[in-house]
Amino acid sequence: MDPTEVAAVEAVVADYIEGWYHGDAARMDRALHPDLVKRIRVVDEETGEETFRAVTKERMMTLTEEGGGEDPDPAYETTVDQISESIATAHVRSPEYLDLLHLAKTEDGWKIANVLFRVR
């Protein structure tokens, strides 16, 4: 992988995760594609029914503006898994979450388009 592209993807992931934990909406906005879909698998405790709860960019922005994560200075680990021209995959492990990310290279640089996550 091109080290310049890896660094660019890592920077976007840092904006995403640090933006969340610092409650920094500008960084979160910079990281997310307008059409973001972020999902978590949930199981209804009463029925056992499995569904996905979706979060949009708009909702992520609201949650970030309200303060984001609980730890203002978390340790986290980012891995860029693959870059192929204008698409990439990465994952980030924070104290609370494992996020699997799909990114797209746009006119404005790399943006996170899809996230599948779980609580750790």
Image (tube, rainbow, N blue to C red):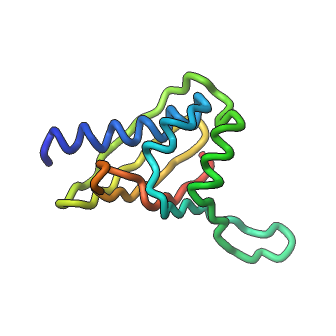
| Nearer to us in this view, 112 or 106 | 106
Which quadrant holds the C terminus? top right
| Nearer to us in this view, 61 or 8 | 61
Where is residue 93 drawn, in percent x and y? 48, 41
Q: Residue at x 50, y 44 (%)?
A: 29
Q: Residue at x 46, y 51 (%)?
A: 32
Q: Residue at x 56, y 32 (%)?
A: 24
> Where, by quadrant of the figure, is residue 10 drawn?
top left
- Relative side of 78 to 62, left or right: left
Where is residue 19 drawn, in percent x and y? 53, 34
In this view, 69 is above or below 52: above
- Relative side of 8 to 45, left or right: left
- Relative side of 63 to 33, left or right: right
Q: Can you name the residue that lies furthest to the left here?
A: 2
Where is residue 109 drawn, in percent x and y? 29, 48
> Where, by quadrant of the figure, is residue 51 drawn?
bottom right
Where is residue 114 drawn, in percent x and y? 46, 61
- For the image shown, how many numbered marks are present on the structure? 0
In this view, 52 is above or below 61: below
Q: Can you name the residue that lies furthest to the right here?
A: 46
- Relative side of 106 to 28, left or right: left
Q: Residue at x 59, y 60 (%)?
A: 56
Q: Can you name the residue that lies furthest to the front here?
A: 107
> Where, by quadrant of the figure, is residue 103 drawn?
bottom left
In this view, 67 is above or below 33: above
| Nearer to us in this view, 110 or 90 | 110
